[in-house]
Image (cartoon, helix red, strand yellow):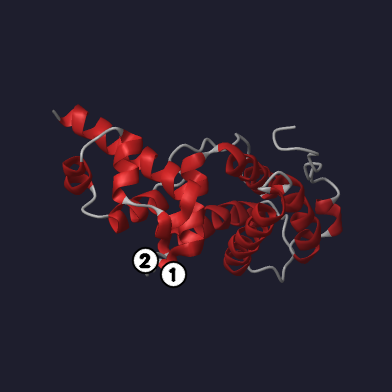
Amino acid sequence: MQQRAVRTREALLRAAAEVFDDVGYTRASITRIIDRAGLTAGAVYFHFKSKEGLARAVIHEQAKDLQFPQGEPGLQHLIDMTDYLAVEMQQNTLLRAGVRLAVEQNEADLQEYAIYEWWAEQFHEELLAARRKGQLLPTADEAVFASLLVAAYTGTQIMSQLSTNRADLPGRISDMWRCLLPALAPAEVIAGITIPEARAEAGA
């Protein structure tokens, strides 16, 4: 019984992510999500209580499927992580839906800021490792930069989505790093960092 409940919740989460990714929060409906999942209304209300509950779950669990690239923590690994995320935004529905809801949540009055703090903490850990390795400028503030990186990444993916449906997102993230790195690391460290080249098309 417990395994079936877990499977049912997972099916609802995935269906909700697909619908929110397609049409956003306002145009999504419980009926549409139920139809996508092939389940009953009772299943939704048992696990999530409401459309708002489903949206919060998609926001909170947006990183559930991610498998970040392996590597020694530090500046290069942080850049590799953000490049990986740019590609995942093109093909990972749960991540994409969670990010969309986090950006558009004022429409639903969700006020879910914790996911931004979670992402900032992931980046902060990499920056602390970079500090221990002597990769950062003395003036660089790891916590401030981690928060700035979340904001810059969020804005960049929105512009990419509007411009090319995120086909150019990896290239835009690479350009973002070329602009930000001089404020974060000395020239000799930057010289040893690999920034991924722009991809001509999504998945290239």
Q: CA distance from mark 2 to mark 1?
A: 6 Å
User: Which of the image's four quarters has the C terminus?
Assistant: top right
Residue marked by disc 2: 110
User: Which of the image's four quarters has the N terminus?
Assistant: top left
Tell whether 30 sits left or right of 136: left
User: Which residue type does callout 2 highlight?
Assistant: Leu
Residue 198, above or below 181: above
Residue 73, above or below 38: below
Q: Residue 133 in the image: state x and y as whole percent.
A: 68, 51
The residue most toward the left is: 1
Q: Is residue 116 visible?
A: no
- The quarter of the picture where residue 154 lies is bottom right
- The quarter of the picture where residue 111 lies is bottom left
Foreground residue, 72 or 91? Answer: 91
Q: Is disc 1 surrounded by few (<14), some (14 to 19) or many (20+) residues within 10 Å?
A: few
Q: Is residue 19 visible?
A: yes
Residue marked by disc 1: 106
User: Which residue type does callout 1 highlight?
Assistant: Asn
Q: Residue 66 in the image: state x and y as whole percent.
A: 50, 38
Q: Residue at x 44, y 64 (%)?
A: 105
Cβ atoms under marks 2 and 1 closer than 8 Å: yes
Q: Residue at x 81, y 42 (%)?
A: 197
Q: Residue 129 in the image: state x and y as whole percent.
A: 61, 51
Q: Is disc 2 surrounded by few (<14), some (14 to 19) or many (20+) residues within 10 Å?
A: some
Foreground residue, 182 or 100? Answer: 100
Foreground residue, 40 or 89? Answer: 40
Tell whether 155 sits left or right of 63: right
- The quarter of the picture where residue 201 lies is top right
Could you tell me which secondary element the residue under label 1 belongs to?
helix
Q: Residue at x 81, y 56 (%)?
A: 178
Could you tell me which secondary element the residue under label 2 belongs to?
loop
Tell whether 111 sits left or right of 141: left
